[in-house]
Amino acid sequence: MGNISIRELSYAYQTDGNTLPILRAASLELPSGAFATVSGPSGSGKSTLLNLIGALDRPQHGNIKVGVVELGELSDWQLAGFRSRMIGFVFQSFHLLPVLSATENVAWPLYFQGIKRSKRMEIAREKLELVGLKGHLNKVPGKLSGGQRQRVAIARALATEPSVVLADEPTANLDRKTAEEIVVLMRSLNENAGVTFLMATHDPMVVAHALQRIELVDGKLIEQKQIQRQEVLAHA
């Protein structure tokens, strides 16, 4: 299950002996299958929030639950397993390995699950076809456009069959047309596979496609009213 529950979450950075609060007793409930955005100004903590949900960082106070898993109860080793099984990551800078083909990049996370190479490559090809890259399986990232690289990154995020995909500014390095295609692709994957998507974004176009719209204001998560899917489609 890809539901996310956040309770009284707090996080602060220490800089030059000063404490900089980012999240202040923030709480949020997202249902499984959500297609949600979190927006706010630069430095407001959007990326920090995704890192905490994705178990890349630990909260200083409060609790995070993804599905039935309480992250605070897990050891570092268990958190690594949780990330591998339940979370897919998509970043604005793609973070693809430049010497590997698109198929090899998508297959890479499966290596850490102990899946044999032939099966890894089979899964990777399936995911790349799912995101519309059937004709680009053997190309390295340098031979792909920005939109194609982001599609590879999305395919990689889906390779492990995660319950939740966390996307940090997924359209920031894309032109407008390509950005819209990427958001429509993610929404289609959300609808067809039931994967929960949470996207940190400045982009009003991305927010317009979201069914759950959250703002990060003064360290608090303010959830807007849930949008009906037909209402989103009418304005897309």
Image (tube, grey):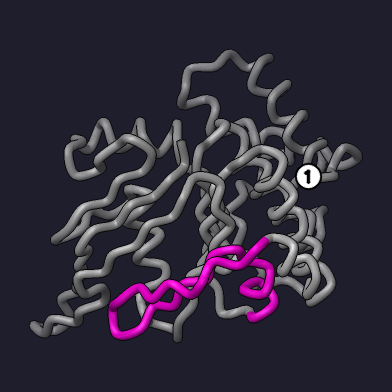
The span picked out in magenta is: 204-228
Residue 177 relative to residue 102: left or right: right
On screen, residue 72 above or below 236: above
Q: Residue at x 69, y 46 (%)?
A: 191
Could you tell me residue 142's position as x and y percent? 76, 55
Residue 121 relative to residue 164: left or right: right
SS class, disc 1: loop
Q: Residue at x 30, y 45 (%)?
A: 65
Could you tell me residue 102's position as x and y percent? 73, 41
Residue 136 counted in the magenta span: no
Residue 29, quarter of picture:
bottom left
Q: Residue at x 70, y 54 (%)?
A: 187
Residue 214 counted in the magenta span: yes
Residue 144, quarter of picture:
bottom right
Could you tell me which quadrant the C terminus lies in?
Answer: bottom right
Residue 186 relative to residue 57: left or right: right
Could you tell me residue 2's position as x and y percent? 47, 42
Could you tell me residue 185's position as x and y percent? 76, 54
Q: In the current view of this chain or complex, which residue is farthest to the right?
A: 135
Label 1 crowding class (10 Å Cα cut-off): few <14, some 14-19, many 20+?
many
On screen, residue 123 above or below 178: above
On screen, residue 207 above or below 170: below
Viewer-nearest residue: 234 or 17: 234
Q: Residue at x 79, y 38 (%)?
A: 130
The residue that mark 1 highlights is: 131
Q: Amino acid at mark 1?
A: Val
Q: In the current view of this chain or complex, which residue is farthest to the left?
A: 17
